[in-house]
Amino acid sequence: MIPSQLPVFISVVNNGNFSAAARQLGVSSAAVSKSISQLEKTLSLRLFHRTTHSLTLTEDGQDLLRRTEPLLKELEDQIRLSTDKQLSAHGKLKVNLPDSFGRQVVMPLLPGFMEKYPDIEFELNFDDAVSDLVKEGADVGIGAKINEDSRLIARRYYNVQPITVATRGYLDKHGWPETPEDLAQHNCIGYRSSNTGRVMPWSFMRDGIEHHFEPRGNLVVNNFSAAMKAVEMDMGIATVGAWYAKECLKEGCLQRLLPGYAPDPVTIWIYYSSRSYLPAKTRLFIDYMLENSIDEQAMILACEQAESARQTALFNQHVAS
């Protein structure tokens, strides 16, 4: 007979302690502790070394995990497969997203997906920090950074083209930088990474080689929304993803700087647990995101064409008057 406490045992191992496992399972820590004790009694094995501050597997515990975890995952997959054959895509889909990118790029795609699959409910977690997808119980993650985990599969989702921008008001007052070195004479708005705690360097390409520039100025933020707001208020120059500045570039309220030094795009990944079978809700969401990904290079070209047309129209109006 298969002990009913095995899923609790695996949850404790994956979460590292009884409290975290209890939160994931929706039960009390006492219930988790009782289940583990019952399992040890049933198997006549000691599965954990317990101290006040740590919980580690014994040799018997490691052996039990190695033998049973793949079998339980396969059983879970087969049960889900049987269920999905009976039902349409449904249930809660938990997605981890980077803050600004998630709101500006991913969320505009959700209404179309939700209209197509109305029985899928979303729980969106916005955080620029690298998250542990499996530990947090999320179905899908999107981001430029992924924690090292052999249980995850990552697919290329989006190529972000970093661009350097400022308002014409700022540039008229402080001048236009012609090279990356000229930025040393400007107020550069820095972005502090929530993962490393460091102010992120700006990258520029020259002669096929990528060079890094440390932004210097009187303002550092930890959110691209704040960086863009500061730029729009004529406070300085910032480097952001082209997707973030597209509307302002089209309307001419922002100017793109140093286009000849643009670095290579940054890859955004969509990643998920490496199971042999994905629930229908997860598979459909991933496929939809990949099918509706935006081509940033085409978007930048469209913005430049719109700005060129706007400048031509202004010039013609000036000549006519």
Image (spheres, grey):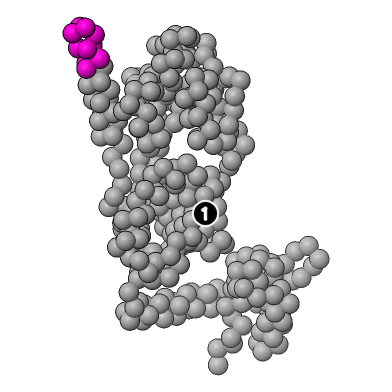
Q: Residue at x 67, y 82 (%)?
A: 35
Relative vertical location of residue 69 with respect to residue 165 in this rendering, above or below = below
Name the residue at the front extreme.
321
* Left or right for 128, reference 274: right
The residue identified by callout 1 is: 125
Q: Residue at x 78, y 62 (%)?
A: 53
Q: Which residues are magenta?
A: 312-321
Q: Quadrant for the N terminus, please.
A: bottom right
Query: Mark 1 is on which residue type?
Result: Asn
Relative vertical location of residue 293 with respect to residue 176 in this rendering, above or below = below
Image position, residue 177 (x, y; %): 43, 12
- Mark 1 falls on what kind of element? strand
- Identify the main secondary structure in magenta: helix
Q: Residue at x 66, y 66 (%)?
A: 20
Image position, residue 296 (x, y; %): 31, 36
Q: Which quadrant of the structure image shows residue 312?
A: top left
Image position, residue 74 (x, y; %): 44, 77
Q: Nearer the viewer, residue 42 or 282?
A: 282
Is 17 part of what is drawn in magenta? no
* Left or right for 74, reference 128: left
Q: Please state the total of marks drawn on the protein image.
A: 1
Image position, residue 233 (x, y; %): 50, 23
Residue 138 showing in the rendered view:
yes
Q: Quadrant for the C terminus, please.
A: top left
Name the residue at the right extreme.
52
Is 315 part of what is drawn in magenta? yes
